[in-house]
Image (cartoon, helix red, strand yellow):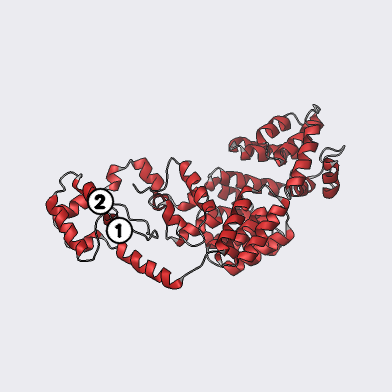
Amino acid sequence: MEATAQQTQSGIDLFGDILPNMDQIKRLSQQVHSSEANLSAFSQQLEQNLNKTGAKGCLAAGIGLFITGRNSEAVEKLQKGADCKEKFTYLAFALRELGRFDEAIKALDTSAKHGADTLAVAMEKAATYRKAKNYDAAKKELQSCANFKNVGAEYHYQLGRLLEVQGHYDEATTNFKAAIELSPTHWPALFHLAYRCDLSGEEDAAIDYYKQIAAGSTAYVSALMNLAVVYEDKDDYDRAARCVEKVLASHPNHKRANLFLKDIESSKTMVYDEENEKKKTRKLQILETPISDFELSVRSRNCLKKMNINTLGDLLRTSEAELLAFKNFGETSLREIKTILDAKSLQLGMPIEEKHFAPAQPAENEVAEDDAQDQGLLSKPLGDLQLSVRAKKAVMNLNMHTIGDLTRTTEAELLGCKNFGVTSLNEIKRALENLGLSLRTLE
């Protein structure tokens, strides 16, 4: 019954006597992913057709497997399907998702030989090269279609995506806008334009673009989620909650949406004390005072440097015993440091209430001590972590730019940032763990 209802709603039967065309399959895929109920119904219908062994049945089943994200099975089924442009196009899509880029390119070339649209094939090849990080090949593919400039929306979208991953954000934005002017319902271009506005701080424009997507495409859950993040950043918690609730209405088990809704509800109860924040800022400025600003002997200064104590805050978090346990650090140096701290009514090992410390700069000798490969990883931009918009904006607000900046930050420092919740913290921790890294911990 569910499968029949889904089929009626979409008006497209993938497993009927006649295979739907490419546009129809695309619409079917959007409908399937517009809700958990639709995906469940389609998955049941797919299971009922997986046992078909004929070339025609394998083709439909392979496309269905790709739509549901079962790419390895999709490749196996499609290879047994009847040769046609649909077979090789969706075979290329599945291979691309599996990271088998060279095979995907060959499949796309074969789809062209079976009648696939030349421009569509070129655009998918450009996307495949881009995902393979072969940017020169992607550029060359797009240059071969330069006659579609100001004519083809997909051309400008793919060019925008290539420019975006290469860091040419203004040019990327220009091409996304060109794509939308040519095709106002080009949802991928509209989404990436909204995302670029979001990251560049153009919140009102981002909201407008995200709302257009949410109103026109039920499959773009990510647009609603990003819109919710923007609303929350503007302290508009009610609108943020409504966006997330709309996602949960069709995807009740969406993990990120469920966690985000809890964060939003928690944010509603947060009170922003402006005077208290000013006091925190003053504390922060004091604790960030470099050790080099104090008149210390060369011996004491060198010892602190080797212990990676670079700021007053670092020093206050250190006990007398820890200092004396360090090689060549003696009572004379200890008395010298205590005299300076006493003049400021401070002492070693004192509890520091304020958790809003900015990440400390690495000591000069860190490069020599750390493995060169690790240094290369730590110097990579935060964009390489592929964080969600919410998490990315939170760390940007903390003035972080590299993975190394993030690893020198504690959980408490992140959670102390306004509107930064447990959801974003867990996302960042998972991303770092995948690289064998972690946030800084205080002993």
Which residue sits at x=25%, y=62%? 346
Q: Is residue 232 above or below residue 325?
A: below
Quarter of the image where the N terminus is located: top right
Q: Position of residue 82 (x, y in %)?
A: 78, 32
The local secondary structure at tag 1 comes to helix
The number of numbered discs placed on residues in the rendered structure image is 2
- Determine the residue located farthest toward the left in the rendered image: 332
Depth check: give the residue in front, 360 or 90. Answer: 360
Depth check: give the residue in front, 112 or 236. Answer: 236
Q: Position of residue 167 (x, y in %)?
A: 50, 56
Spatial distance from mark 1 to mark 2, Cα to Cα?
12 Å
The residue that label 2 is drawn on is 319
Residue 303, which numbered label? none
| Kind of residue at disc 2 | Ser
Q: Is residue 126 above or below residue 76?
A: below
The local secondary structure at tag 2 comes to loop
| Kind of residue at disc 1 | Gly
The residue that label 1 is drawn on is 313
Precedes in sequence: disc 1 or disc 2:
1
